[in-house]
Image (tube, rainbow, N blue to C red):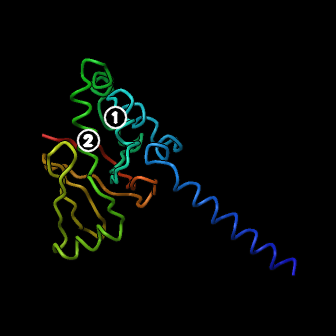
Amino acid sequence: MKKLVFILTTFAALTFSQNAKAQGTIVDAAVGNENFSTLVTALKAADLVSALQGDGPFTVFAPTNAAFGKIDSNTLGSLLKPENKKALSNILTYHVVSGKLAAADVVAALKKGNGKVVLKALNGQELTVVQKSGKIWLQDQNGNYSEITATDVMGSNGVIHVINSVVMPK
């Protein structure tokens, strides 16, 4: 009997904690993850936090700190300056798609599109999702690739998929 009570209590606690996590926005999910501290700093510098806390739904392809680390530090520092807010906003909104596309939705679209699907980012430009070598990648309009390394970080207003490089608009 004690074992059954323990199992039920554990199940209830896990269910509650999972639901509590899903109640926060995608911004809350990013703020709560130390691997996204550079992204959060950039969102604040571009004044996009409140927009991404809106109703959505949004799909965010979120670069990690390591992904931002691939950008020259002088370039990144320059982008974070107030006078470059518009350029930074253009880059960040290139990582966001309107609608909630869970990993299963992306995989289904890839199957339907023979391993390729084109998405329209919030900045109006296109991102291409491709499947190759058993992995799923984003390809930017410059031909550069970023691997999707983790999926389905859920928020109340959308979903985050983690990428290992910053994709750049034209």
**Of the residues shown, which amino acid type is indicated by label 2?**
Thr
x then y, percent, for residue 152: 42, 61
Residue 26, percent from left and from top: 43, 48
Circles 2, 1 touching at the beta carbon (< 8 Å): yes
**Left or right side of 79 for 42:** right
Report which residue position mark 1 lands on. Answer: 48
Secondary structure at badge 1 equals loop
Residue shown at 24% from the left, 37% from the top: 91
Most extreme residue toward the front, as rendered?
55
Q: Which residue is situated farthest in the right direction here?
A: 2
Distance from the alpha carbon under mark 2 to that under mark 1? 9 Å
Question: Which numbered tag is attached to residue 93?
Answer: 2
> What amino acid type should be assigned to the residue bearing mark 1?
Leu
CA neighbours of label 1 inside 10 A, class few (<14), some (14 to 19), many (20+): some
The residue drawn where x is 42% and y is 36% is 40
Check the picture and name the quadrant holding the C terminus.
top left
Q: Pinpoint residue 81: horizontal percent, then vertical percent.
A: 31, 19
Taking 101 as reference, is 26 above or below it?
above
* N-terminal label among 2 and 1: 1
How packed mark 2 is, by other alpha carbons closer than 10 Å (few <14, some 14-19, many 20 or more), is many
Compared with 62, 6 (above or below) is below
Is 118 left or right of 161, judged from the image as shown?
Answer: left
Q: Where 57 falls versus 102 (above or below)?
A: above
